[in-house]
Amino acid sequence: MDFIPINVPAMGEEEKKAALSVIESGLLTDSSYEGGKWVKSFERKMRDLLNVKHVIAVNSGTAALHAALLAAGVGPGDEVLVPSFTFVATANVVLACGAKPVFVDTKGDYNIDPALLRGAMTKRTKAVIPVHLYGYPADMDEIREAATRKSVRVIEDAAESLGAEYRGRQTGSLSEEGCFSMYATKVATSGEGGAVSTDDDELADRVRLVRNHGMVHGYDTRHLGFNYRLPEMAAAIASVQMDRLPQFLKKRASNVKFLRERLTSVPGATFTQDAGDRTHSNYLHTLFLRRNRDKVLAKLNAAGIGAAVYFKTPVHRTPLYAKLGYAKELRQTQSASEHVLSLPVHPKLGEEEMDRVARGFVAAADGLL
C-alpha cells in the first residue's frame, strides 16, 4: 500500500520547460538591483494576485522575514511580538536582527490573540508578526488596531497562506509588509524561495537592498544586506506555479470538503479554522483531538497515512529558547501543541486517496477520542 504524504510538490511539464529554458540560456542568476527575467515574472504575478505595489522575491521565507524586519529598522534594543505556536523561523529572524522576540499566546484558531497584544507591548515594541497558521488568516483588523494605537509595525508571516483572503483581501496585503515562502511543500513552490510584499515604496527599496548586499550599482553597499537573491531557475518554477495556484487552491478546498463531510460525526475531533469572513489556503487541514492525539497519529502512520503534528514543541519550549530564559506559560499554545493533528489534503490526492485518509482517521480514532 502506497504511503500518503502530508504534502508534496505538484510539478508538471511547464515547470520542466521553464527550468530547462534557464539552463539553456546560461543566465542562472542575476545580481542586478531589479533581478532577472524570471524573478520579475514571478514578482509581477504575485503582485497582481495580492493587488499590491511591490513584491520582492528572495530565496526563502526566512529571508523574507529577516529582510522585512531589517527594512523596517528592527535592531538591538527592540522587541517584536510573535506567537510561539509557529515554525521557529518567525522568532529566529528577530534574534538575527539583535532584537528580542516576545511570545504572545494564541486563540482557539491557533493564531495570535489580538486581545493579548496590547498588554504585551512596551516602549521597546517595534513590530508584531502575526502568523496565518496552516493557511488560515489571523484577526488582522484587531491586530492592526492594537498595533496602530502604539505606533507598532505589523509584518505578516504569510508563509503558509498564499491565496487565502481576509475580508476580501489577500493575506500579505493587510499590513506594512507580507512575507511568503515557496518551500517545497508549500501551496505553490520553487523548491526554496520566498517573497516580501508591500505598498510602501521606501520599504520596497530597502528590501531590495537587503536581498543584494545593500548594493544598487556594483559594489556600492548602502545598507546592511545579504545574498537573499532568488536564482532564475527557482524563479522560473515559481512563475509557472503562480499560474497554477488557482487550481491548487480549488483542489485543496475540494479535498478538505470531502474530509469534513466524512469526519463531522467523529466525536472528540474539532475543526476550529472556519470563520465566515475569511478563506483558507488549506495548506494543512488541522483537527483538535480531545485526547490520545499521539496514539491516533501512530495508528494513521502505521496505516500508511502521513498525518503529522505542527507544532509539537512550541518555539519558546525548544532547547535554544529555553536556554535563553523563555519559560513563560502560554496555556492556549501548550494546549494546541498537545492536541492538534494535520491530515493530507494536497492537490495530488484524488478521491481514492482522500477516502483512504477519511476511513483511516475514523478507524484510528475509534475508541480513542
Image (tube, grey):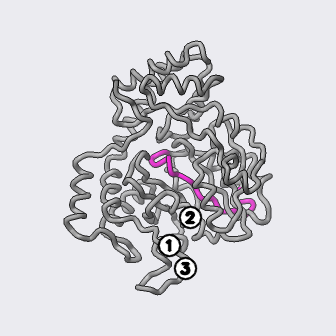
| Image quadrant containing the N terminus | top left
Nearest-to-viewer mark from 3 and 1: 1
Spot occupied by residue 105 in the image (x, y as percentages of width and height): 72, 44
Q: Secondary structure at mark 3?
A: loop
Instruction: Indicate which label's residue lies in the foreground, 1 or 2.
Output: 1
Q: Which residue is mark 3?
A: 223
Does residue 241 lie above or below 108 as drawn? below
Q: Position of residue 202 (x, y in %)?
A: 54, 74
**98 drawn magenta:** no
The amino acid on which the numbered mark 3 sits, given as a three-letter code, is: His
Mark 2 lies on a secondary structure that is helix
Q: Is residue 133 above or below residue 4?
A: below
Q: Amino acid at mark 2?
A: His
Closer to the chain start, of discs 3 and 2, is 2
Q: Residues within 10 Å of mark 1 (few under 14, many from 20)?
A: some
Q: Quadrant of the C terminus?
A: top right
| Residues at discs 1 and 2 in contact (Cβ within 8 Å) | yes
- Residue 249 location, x and y as percent? 40, 40
Q: Residue at x 59, y 27 (%)?
A: 294
Report the magenta residues as a range: 147-164
Residues 33 and 93: in front is 93
Tag 1: amino acid: Phe
Residue annotated with mark 1: 226
Mark 1 or 2 closer to N-term? 2
- Left or right for 238, reference 368: left
Which residue was labeled with disc 2?
A: 66
